Amino acid sequence: MAKFFNSLRDGVGFDLILVGAAMVFLLALAGLPLVYNVLMSFQQVDMFTLGQLIRPFAGISNYVAVVQQPEFWMVTRNTLVFVVGSMAGQFVLGFALAVFFAQKFPGAATIRGLFLVSWVMPGLVVGAIWSWILAGDFGVLNSILRGLGIIQSNIFWKSDPSFSIWAVIIANIWLGLAFNMLLLSVGLAAIPRDLYEAAELDGANAWQRFWTITLPMMRSTIGAVLSLGLIGTLQQFDLFPALTEGGPANTSNVAGYWSWQLSFQLYDFAKGATVSVMMFVLVLFASILYVRSTRHEVRG
Amino acid sequence: MTRTYTPWALLAIALALAAVYLFPLYWMYVTSLKSGSEIFANPPSFWPAAPNANIYADVWARRTMSTFLWNSVIIASGVTAITVILGTGCAYVLARYRSAWIDLGLFAILMLQVLPASVMITPLFVGFNQIGLLNYPRTAVVLAAAAKAMPFFVVLVRATFMSVPRELEEAALVDGNSRVGAFFFIVLPLARNGILVCAILTFMSAFGEYIYSKSIIQSPLLQPASVGLSGFLGPNSSDWNAIMAYSAIYVTPILLVFVILQRRIVSGLTSGALK
């Protein structure tokens, strides 16, 4: 017994307690719910069985019902558009800014740091601000675009079915841009300077240096940033209730928000669980990409 | 000749880019100071004709912001406390050893980091309902949000511990310290700054937490500021100067902390999130 307490104070037992406490907590509040989610997606859940663990088995009928919902394909398409659009925007703009801020000029690091302000703001507030900027009749974006002569009449970003998903994408690009830029800046800073000097001596122009040095040297960083972007985009929720609430007519609804609507607005927890299991499969795919691209970091 | 001017030209471009990027924030403050009719002026004015700061006191009282913000502080404090207490030790062990088990633990943490809240909320809500935790809604939100925040915290703090020299801890052990003593008196003080920055980041993100609170907390007396904001926000909102005043009151403390700690936050993030 004394040996046991000794180990807690001065041996492996100490490590096990430290790591064990966190792991038990995470297992109870993240691991268990995940399993429970899968279980629920195969059960019949209604107001009467909500409080029970053992509910009537439903087989794959929940999955069939979800796929047969009229909005299913619309939501799937929107999720895809949202993920690809947000990631492309965040990555391309983030990369351009990272390359720009890698130049040497006074205050570069400080100004770059200011961009990160978007990352610490509550998502709902960001959604509220963009909701006002994108407003149809009195939004400032429309009047700027009109002033520049890009559009002739107002675009109703939030209520026009062909633009509603883009309203959320624009806000999401703004939100995630800074984080992308920061991570890419770290990758850029790690490329040895002499590579560029050697290429310059050999007569490579800026464009060639970018394609033959920057991009290949950044490969693992780009992999990690893209998979983090995919994960971040799939996690995005707050912007939807703030901007469009998935509407009009589900034209800006994505899987995460739809799952929440099914559970907490229609109280159809089985379908909500089913959609979130489907989404989890997608996230699993993203996280495998992420773990693969950060594997060298994990191994230390 | 051009060489000497280039840095200043770049600085000017950088400032212009930052101005464009931070325009939404400027627009929030400007709109909040405009009158009810001026916000619908066409074309919009980029500076309020008659700045009126009374709306802040008005919104504060009318929207019972003191209650909402107090709840946000309680929830964020709870999340931060649990995350720091449980996460720090976990990060330390994951940084100290290298083995297949540690790899497995890290893999599990990385996997948990990617779970979207919208996937977790349905099973968490039904599960909390079954064990009766929904009667203590703020506690339920704190537990759920802490589980969400912890993986990211562990990844960042682990990087901090990696930069603490092993030799210092080993010297303390040789001098007769126990593992517990070496951890609390040598390793923790050395990693204090990194842990503090990560704790502040955790607090800030929990301060803006929305989905769990919205789904779990029904009583307006217990809801945080994010849910309070969603109460008068929707596709058809029109009360924009009040919404922007509410948002400004809500985010200004976060922005101040960020500006003060900007350098530390950026370096903490870059060392931990990606190597």
Image: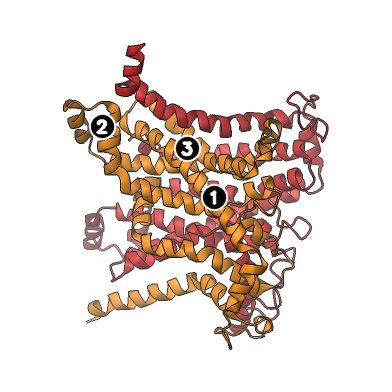
Chain colours: A red, B orange
Q: Earlier in the sequence, mark 2 or mark 1?
A: 1
Residue drawn at 23 percent across, 78 percent down:
B4
Residue on which the image places disc 3 = B110
- Which secondary structure lies at badge 3? helix
Q: Chain of mark 1?
A: B
Q: Nearer the viewer, residue A28 or A287?
A: A28
**Chain for disc number 3:** B
- The residue beneath circle 2 is B182
* Residue type, mark 2 in image: Ala
The amino acid sitting under disc 1 is: Ile
Q: Earlier in the sequence, mark 2 or mark 3?
A: 3
| Mark 1 vs mark 3, CA separation in Å | 28 Å
Image coordinates of residue B275 in percent, x first then y, are: 35, 45
Q: Secondary structure under badge 1?
A: helix
- Image-based side of B7 in relation to A86, left or right: left
For mark 1, does the 10 Å Cα neighbourhood hold few (<14), some (14 to 19), or many (20 or more) residues?
some
Does residue A100 appear anywhere in the picture?
Answer: no
On the image, the x and y values in percent for residue A12 come to: 34, 21
Residue placed at 70% from the left, 35% from the top?
B129
Q: Nearer the viewer, mark 2 or mark 1?
A: 1
Image x and y of residue B35, in percent: 64, 82
| Of B15 and A189, the residue lying toward us | B15
Q: Chain of mark 2?
A: B
Mark 3, residues whose alpha carbon is within 10 Å: few (<14), some, or many (≥20)?
many
Question: Where is A251 relative to B87, above or below?
Answer: below
Taking A147 as reference, is A204 left or right?
left
Q: Which residue is mark 1?
A: B74
